Structures are given as C-alpha cells and as structure tokens.
Amino acid sequence: MLRNVLLIVCTMISLVFVGNVFAKSCSDMSAEKKLAGAAKNSFLKKCEKDAKASCEADSDEKKLSGAARNSHMKKCVNDAVGAPA
C-alpha cells in the first residue's frame, strides 16, 4: 500500500516537472517559427487571447476572486506570453 502511494506521488511530481520544462511561451514559439512583422504580431495576439481564456478557466476552476484572481491572472498570462522575442 505504501509502495503504491509512493509510486503515485513520484509519478505526479515527475509529470509536473516535465510539464514545466516543455511548456513554451508565445514568444518562444514565435521565435521558433521565425515569425516577423505582421505574422508575428498576429500570432502573439492570438496566443495571448488563448492564454487569457485558459488562465480565466483556471481561475474559475480554482474559484478565485478579487485580488487573488487578479494576481493569478497576471502571473498566468505573463508566464504563457513570455518576454517579447
């Protein structure tokens, strides 16, 4: 029983780590695709819109409101969009 619990915990930790390592920001993806000019602006705009929708759904799922929701949304969207490339 303890072995099963330990296995589940280790699996969950490794999945979280792998997910964070391979998560790419919008800026990273635009640089990888070698976008420039209007194509890059369009891609970043859509990516940011998608990130906001995803972060809002996450905030709703976590039942956040007020300052906690605003803080979560700001961090979530900034992490997803990334620094301009």
Image (cartoon, rainbow, N blue to C red):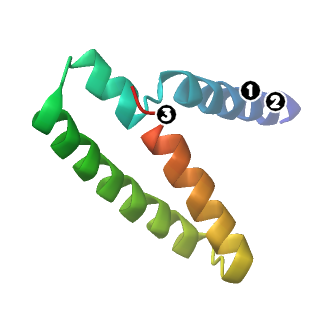
Estimate the x, y position of residue 60 in percent, counting from the top left: 53, 75
Estimate the x, y position of residue 14 in percent, counting from the top left: 65, 24
Tell me the crowding category of disc 2: few under 14, some 14 to 19, or many 20 or more residues within 10 angstroms, Cα based.
few
Tell me the crowding category of disc 3: few under 14, some 14 to 19, or many 20 or more residues within 10 angstroms, Cα based.
few
Q: Marks 3 and 2, how far apart in space?
A: 37 Å
At horizontal 66% and vertical 82% (from top left) the residue drawn is 65
When the figure is inspected, residue 73 is found, relative to residue 28, above or below; the finding is below
Name the kind of residue labelled 1 in the image.
Cys
Residue underneath mark 1: 10
| Front residue of 63 and 15 | 63
Residue underneath mark 2: 6
Estimate the x, y position of residue 48 in percent, counting from the top left: 35, 51
Image quarter where the N terminus lies is top right
Q: Secondary structure at mark 1?
A: helix
Tell me the crowding category of disc 1: few under 14, some 14 to 19, or many 20 or more residues within 10 angstroms, Cα based.
few
At horizontal 20% and vertical 17% (from top left) the residue drawn is 34
Question: Label for residue 83?
Answer: 3
When the figure is inspected, residue 36 is found, relative to residue 51, above or below; the finding is above
When the figure is inspected, residue 85 is found, relative to residue 59, above or below; the finding is above
At horizontal 27% and vertical 27% (from top left) the residue drawn is 30
Q: Marks 1 and 2, how far apart in space?
A: 6 Å
Q: Secondary structure at mark 3?
A: loop
Mark in front: 1 vs 3? 3
Are circles 1 and 2 on residues that touch, CB within 8 Å?
yes
Mark in front: 1 vs 2? 1
Mark in front: 3 vs 2? 3
